[in-house]
Image (tube, rainbow, N blue to C red):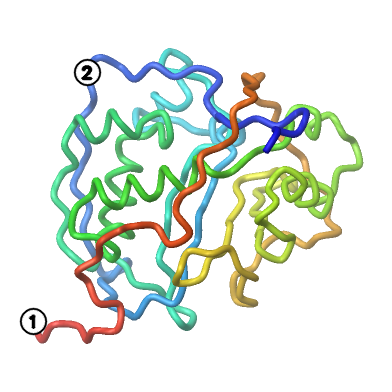
Amino acid sequence: MLVAPGTALAQAASCSPPAQIPRPRLETASASEPRRFLPIGGYTLALSWSPQYCATARGADSAIQCGGRSGRFGFVLHGLWPEGEGAEWPQYCRPAKLLPRNLIRENLCTTPSVQLLQHEWAKHGSCMATRPELYFDLSRALYGSIRYPDMNALARRDTLTVADFVAAFVRVNSRLKPHMIRVQTVRGNRLKEIWLCMDRAMEFVRCPARQRGAPAASRLRIEPGPAMPRTKKAAPTPPRRPALILDLDPNAQAPAN
C-alpha cells in the first residue's frame, strides 16, 4: 500500500541514545497505586505528543526526550495498557525487577525515557507477560504499525477541532475509525496524547463510554514538532493476533498471599 502524502511512519526526526544509559528506579505498588489482579477486558495503546510534553517538562527524567542531544521526537509510545472489564484495570501484577540496560537502549527511540520504560513494565507489562522483552516487543510492533498525519500542517490550522484531527488520523490509518480514538488534552485545549482502543484479541474497537476524551467539537491546539522524514515503505503490521506468550491467566483469581 502506498503511503499517503504527508504521512510520517517514523516519529523520531532523529534519535541517538546516550552512551551511558541511566539506571531507573524500582517502582512497586503502593497505597495510592495498589496491586490489582483483574481479568483483562481489552487494551489501550497510548501515544503521547512529545512536543507538548517537552514544552513544560523539567528534571532529569525528561532529559533524553526533551534535551535535544539524544533526539527530536513527535508521537512517542506512552505505553500499552491492559484494561479491565469494568471501571478498574489490572496493575502491578508481579514484582518488577530493574530493566536491563540493553533492553532500555533497544526501546529508547520509541519511549525516550528510562524511568517511563521501567514504570510501564512495572505497572502494566507485569500484568501481560512474565518477561519484559515480550511486553516491549509487542508494544513496539503495535506502535510501528501506526501512521501519522502531517502534524505541523495541522498545527498551523487556526480552526482545528478534535474531530478534524481525528479525521486526519483516520485517513492515514485504514484500520481505525473515529470511535476507536480518544484525544487527551491539557490546559488551553492543547494536544497531550491519543488513546487507541483494542479488544482482547488486540483488534481496534470502539472505545468504551467510560474512557473519555476531549469533545469532538472542541478546538484543538497542537505544539509544533520537528519535521519528520518521509518514506515510501509501508509500516510493518503486527500479526492479527500478536504472538505474545502469557502465563498469567487473565481470568485467574489472585493468589491467597
Q: Which sits earlier in the primary sequence, circle 1 or circle 2?
A: 2
Q: Which residue is mark 2?
A: 20
Task: Say which quadrant the C terminus sits in.
Answer: bottom left
Residue type marked 2: Gln
Q: Identify the residue position indicated by label 1 in the image.
A: 257
Q: Identify the residue shown where x is 86% and y is 59%.
A: 217
Relative to 194, is 154 above or below? above
Q: Nearer the viewer, residue 232 or 137?
A: 232
Amino acid type assigned to the residue bearing label 1 in the image: Asn
71 shown above or below 245: above
- Percent across and percent down for residue 215 are 78, 62
Residue in the image at 58% along x and 58% along y: 196
Q: Position of residue 228 (x, y in %)?
A: 63, 22
Find the distance from the CA under tag 1 to the CA under tag 2.
Answer: 39 Å
Q: Position of residue 84 (x, y in %)?
A: 42, 77
Height in image: 211 above or below 257?
Answer: above
Find the residue positioned furthest to the left.
257
Q: Is residue 55 visible?
A: no
